[in-house]
Amino acid sequence: MSAPIVIIGASHGGVQLAASLRQLGCEDKIILYSAEDVLPYHRPPLSKAFLSGEKDLDQILLRGPAFYEDHGIDLRLSDPVTSIDLTTRRLAARSGVQNFSRLILATGSKARELKAPGSDLQNIFTLRSLGDVLRLKQAMLDARDIVIIGGGFIGLEFASTAAKLGKNVTVIEARERLLMRALPASVGDFLRDYHAGHNVQFHFNANFAEFEGADGKLHAIRLADGTRIKADMALVGIGGEADLALLAPLGLNMIAGGIEVDEFGRTSIEDVYALGDVAASANMLVNEPMRLESVQNAVDQAKAVAAHMLGQDAPAPVVPWFWTDQYDLKVQMAGLSRPGAVQTIRGDVEGNAFSVLETMDGRLVALFSINRAADHMAARRLIAEGAPLDMNLAADASVPLMKAVAKP
Amino acid sequence: MSGTVTIFFETPQGLREVGAKIGASVMETAVMNNVSGIEAECGGACICATCHVYTDKVPQELLQPMSSEEDDMLDMATAERRSTSRLSCQLRVTAELENTVFIIPESQF
């Protein structure tokens, strides 16, 4: 009997891979390693419904407790992998040495750290994992003045949760507007204004200098221009990086900050796959390797890896999509924003329900929607089909977007 | 959240009886109890339409009203949309749902 299939990392991608392998008929032993001590869970609610207490851990589990055993998946919790040897196909974990026939790296990403004077003070946090939330939640509840360093998705979601609790929230952003790489200016500015309407303060073009405090406690943060902002809690949300801690000695090809993989998740070494945040690949929209930190990307890559491992047809490529919930706004993104695309607004910006279409040569390449779920779902299909749009119809929010395809 | 009720899921593989926590969503109940056919890829954010159920066998007045968002998402669900279609992440379990049956479509993709 062959050695087991071993998956390192039991979040959205790793769990989906194990599930998909079983669903497609794989009969090998499957071992799923997790460094965490809780059943695998959905990460997006961590900064929202779980942080606010609206949902408890039971309500955000990826799969029920019985799933793993019922599907013959050997889920090993609290069992960090500490080294990997590809020559002998063995790894060492807390529970001991394990051999494998095929290895899948789904180790995800970790929060980028802010190394600055004072960063060892208490009440400075990052937010990526359940453990992070459990560590920071009481500090958030006790805080009066919260500073968020980095106006990215996690920072803004946290800002909305904290602002709803009545905290004084300030967001420090190094660039001139929010989410410049991910969102069109009109959407970034809309979000800024919406947060401002909930009393969130912003500092743009702000270079962080140091944390200030006394007796180990945070009192303020200081910017390079001397501005001092009172803070008894700080959240650092300056992006993520692939978690490559284990991987340096393996000799895998790396690119764009991640492990280089093809459309089947194959790395440069046979029988070693990577997926999710840790992997960099081209996608159906952009023909150059990139890491995409999203649930959708992890889940769809896992499905592609499972099919390839079992010699089955690859699933159809999927248009990248992403969402963020802030206050009562449902912000959804389909496709990827591209320089040079033409932007068209559809809907009612003042009424908080609009979409920004990005088109190239009359074809939709990305759509950013605020409280317009139907536009988002239509865009996922229209981008995949590459159908030319009648832009007069597409700009008319009273016409369903699916009906805006140009007549030949 | 206190107490549980019994609800049923009718799947292509047969009928599943599960204990549902009052206050949880019908989707969360299905996931916790390992009911196949509810994918819930987005974890209940009402944006993936992979937790579609048919509520033919549930008295409609026991279900929370549908938001326009859920309505929009259902248009894009993979399985045929019917008048009784709902997204199970938007349905709260209440005591009144005791012994009700939710029907799971053949496919969520």
Image (cartoon, coloured by chain):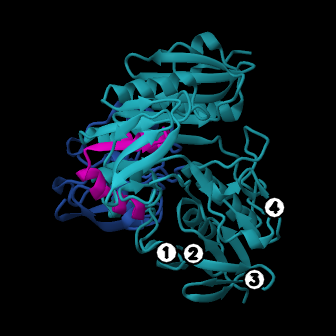
Q: Is residue A402 left or right of residue B30?
A: right
Image location of residue B78, percent across then percent down? 53, 43
The question of residue A158 being in magenta is answered with: yes
Q: Residues within 10 Å of mark 3 (few under 14, many from 20)?
A: some
State the residue at coordinates (39%, 16%).
A350
Q: Which residues are magenta?
A: A130-159
Cβ–Cβ under 8 Å for marks 3 and 4:
no
Q: Are marks 2 and 3 on the same chain?
A: yes
Which numbered disc flags the more N-terminal residue, 3 or 4? Answer: 3
Where is mark 3, residue-wise? A89
The dot on residue A253 is 4
From the viewer's perspective, is residue A48 above or below residue A68?
A: above
Q: Please state which of residues A70 and A359 is positioned toward the viewer in this rendering.
A: A359
Which colour represents chain B? blue
Real-space Cα separation, disc 1 to disc 3, in angstroms: 24 Å
From the viewer's perspective, is residue B84 above or below residue B106?
A: above
Where is mark 1, residue-wise? A68
Which numbered disc flags the more N-terminal residue, 1 or 3? Answer: 1
Where is mark 2, residue-wise? A32
- Helix, strand or loop at mark 2: strand
Q: Residues within 10 Å of mark 1 (few under 14, many from 20)?
A: some
